[in-house]
Amino acid sequence: MGRQLALLLVVFAAGGAIGYMVRSMTGDPVETVGPAARAPVAPAPADERPLPELPREVARDLSVAVAALPSPSLDRSPESIRGALRTAEGDPVPGVKIVARTSSDGERPKDDASFEEEVRDYVKRRAFERAARAEAITGSDGLFILTGLVDAKYQLSGESDDWGVSVKPPHREIRPGVEVQLLATPVVTLDVTVLLPDDTEPKSATVASASPGADRRYPNRIPWRPGQRKVRLPPGTWSVWATGGDLLEFASAKQELTLVAGERRPPLVLRLGDQPGILGTVAIPEGEPIMQIMATALKLGAQEAAEPKRLVQEATSRASVRMDRGGAFAITEVEPGRYLVGVLESNRILAHAVVDVADRLVPVTLSVPAADRSEYAVVWVEGPDGKAAGEQTFVSVNWRSLSRGGWGGGQGATRQADGSYRAYFPEAPKPEEASDAVWVLMVNSQKFGSRTMEFARAEATIVRVRMEEPAFVEVTLEGYAGSGCEGCVDLNVTPKEGGSGGGGKPDGDGRCRMGPVAPGAAAVQVMVSEPRKGRHMVVLRQEVDLVPGTNSVSLRMPPLYELTVVLPDDTVNTNVMLMGLDAERGATSSWARSDGSGKVLFDRLPAGRYRLTVSGRESGTMEVAVPAQSVVRFEAMVFDCFVVRITDAAGLLARAGFAEGDLVTAIDGTELTAQRQMNALFSAAMVKEKSEFTVLRGGRLLTIAFPGPEYEKSRGKAGGTLEPARR
């Protein structure tokens, strides 16, 4: 039965799943115009056309084979998940289906597992997830009880045409025995039909929506299929349109809708048609190993020069190049005009051209020249045993300035058929950085961890990298269960010499396995992470010395405290940022927004020193200590100078004449007296060709010319900073 199932799933994967993924690998969604004749799309080569759908008899046999597998034996928990579904006003919402889903967290098959073992594991996991699923209907009081659960983490969702369902914060780990409060928000369900220009339905499409004032380049996007027609949107005014076609080259006209909670809308028909854009084909030399490339476009003025380098940073439109469609792509979210269009592999520009776009898709062919051997390095990555490290390895080439500390490059490599990697050299460093710059190879292997090494560039560079036997870290976080931080704690391990070490979330007992990571000195961090609150707070950091194999590390969840900040009266819509100042924990931050109550609460804080920054009408900063201070009234520190901090003795600030500890007391003759005034004068100096800074050094006043435009362009690489301070 196992081999029969494996064979059937092979057919299914090839005919269904791969076909679906191929159809889904399209470019960015497009802007809509009215129907028009379709521009031709390059056909796929005969051997790259989508595979046929799964034959009906094979699907029937597959269903029989899967049904014949024994049902998983699950240890059901006697506990349940209870909760209530209510509106923001606290009103109960009855008649909504609440669904609890979980996933199997057992060990995955090893890298060298047979295909049959992988198929068995997949089917086993799917059977577990289906058997562990539970659902309930909310009662007249909005209450629900989910039973028959396994002892695992669950995700809750709701199914309703009138309500969207989400878990109310704090977002803690949901397991049997937990009580959960769910928030119901009104939605309106649309029954959407999407039609191609020939009045047939596409196999798939995307329905996009945007509210007034939103950036329509980044709308909400919902997958659409003939059997999946429902689109749910909150009440309000919306623009709704569809995109479709092999390259998403079709779009419908926008429909302006005003949705009212509780209403039943008539069916919505979105008819796809042509639109302004660029329909391209990329011609690649035979044998050239280009795997993933992106098409980009930049709108030009009538007489504006076409500079290809601008495509890397300034391109306003992008689309994936479909190598399974003979290198075809479509860039459609454009207005009529003159465009520089090109194709990029990472940040490497392969080919480019200038086209004029009118009211429909304009065809263009971009021919990629053969690569010069001096432009790339051939990299061989081996494991400790001398064998190839495997496919799940990422290689990139960078450069590093030894004296300035700057980095550049990050050009990713492409794996070749012989197992080597072709790594193109990124743009060379600037002259002032090139004097002591070295080329650096970064290798990140899912099996062996990461490694960084320097190498010399030659006419035909070849680099061999031997990975070490990796280390793994098994952390036990004592005191995690019952800490109130369940579900919002992240662990990570970082090698001291740089590179990636990995991370993860602890299970219910506070255990987490991380790696692979390079042996040697490293740091294990415990972080409270709540992205919706803007919280990324390191609460514990411990230095460790890792050896190959498994390393056990025991940590204890530290005491966490609260800090209440009392703001000036009538402070509304003000952002308050809390930054950790203890260097041993690294950069940590959390932010909150005032709601008019006059107070802002920061919770789950470790003991230490912090800087509060308030932006708004009452802007400024102050320093606090936790837990010595649990309630503070915000009083902005009075700053009347900038202190110079030098991090690079050969950097821009040092070359201009500034020294560590200098106090800037005046700018262009104006004495510095308050932070807002200081910020305004400093911003003005950034755009002036020359500004004079009055500097207090060792009791003497000096005048130094500040290179404002250069400092602005340095983007944090000026070899130092100027920080607000008091004399």
Image (cartoon, rainbow, N blue to C red):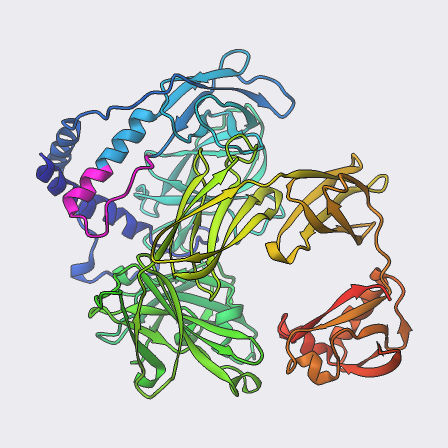
The region drawn magenta spans 104-122
Q: Residue 661: percent from the left, percent from the top?
A: 77, 73
Q: Is residue 108 magenta?
A: yes
Please report the residue visible at 44 percent of the width from the left and 52 percent of the height from the top.
29
Horizontal side, residue 119 vs residue 555: left or right = left
Q: Position of residue 453 (x, y in %)?
A: 40, 74
**Left or right: 258 in relation to 621:** left
Number of marks in the image? 0
* The N terminus - image quarter: top left
Question: Image quarter for residue 277?
Answer: bottom left
Percent across and percent down for residue 662 are: 79, 75
Q: Give 108 or 430, whichever is nearer the viewer.
A: 108
User: Is 404 positioned to the left or the right of 130 in the image?
Assistant: right
Viewer-closest of 318 and 141: 141
Determine if residue 283 is in view: no
Vertical side of 120 occupied by 249: above or below: below
Q: Nearer the viewer, residue 723 or 506?
A: 506
The reply to whether the magenta stretch includes residue 347 is no
Give the image location of residue 480, x and y in percent: 51, 36
Seen at 30% across and 37% down, the residue is 106
Name the image quarter holding residue 25.
bottom left
Asked whether residue 521 appears in the rendered view, the answer is yes
Rendered residue at 83%/60% (across/down):
676
Q: Quadrant of the C terminus?
A: bottom right
Q: Quadrant of residue 117?
A: top left
